Amino acid sequence: MNKDRRKRLAEIEGKLEELKDDLDEIREEEEEAFDNLPESIQVGEKGQNMDANRDALQQAVDSLDESLE
């Protein structure tokens, strides 16, 4: 691999790291919002949707982590 392609890959890796960090931050915010809901709402449709979103964000973060390794 030549120097130019290595440089471009390094730039992409940096962007992926930044995206992963942003997704993880949003996941943490969603988790905090879920934890602050009353239990009756957590077990309802809104809570289940928030939980599913949190899981999807975690899967995205994990996938980016694997890609970066």
Image: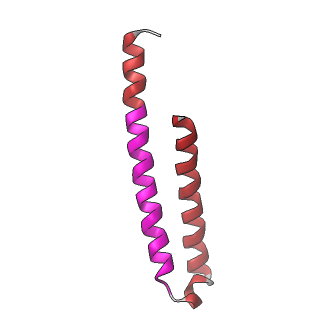
Residue found farthest to the top: 2
Our reading of the magenta stretch's main secondary structure is helix
Is 38 located above or below residue 5 in the figure? below
Q: Is residue 43 left or right of residue 6?
A: right
Q: Residue shown at 42%/68% (left/top)?
A: 29
17 sits left or right of 52 in the view: left
Residue nearest the observer in this picture, 61 or 45: 61
- The residue that appears at 58% across and 58% down in the rendered structure is 56
Which range of residues does the magenta coloring cover? 13-37
Q: Quadrant of residue 17?
A: top left
Q: Residue at x 45, y 47 (%)?
A: 20
State the quadrant of the C terminus.
top right
Q: Position of residue 53 (x, y in %)?
A: 55, 64
43 or 68: which is nearer to us? 68
Vertical position of residue 51 compared to residue 41: above or below: above
At 57% from the left edge and 48% from the top edge, which residue is drawn? 62
Point out the residue furthest to the front here. 69
27 magenta-colored: yes
Q: What colour-coding does the image apply?
A: secondary structure
Residue 15 location in percent, x, y?
38, 37
Membership of 52 in magenta stretch: no
> For residue 14, what is the image quadrant?
top left
- Compared to 5, does 20 lie above or below? below
Location of residue 2 by image quarter: top left
Q: Where in the figure is residue 66, as x and y percent of width and height?
A: 58, 40
Total residue callouts:
0
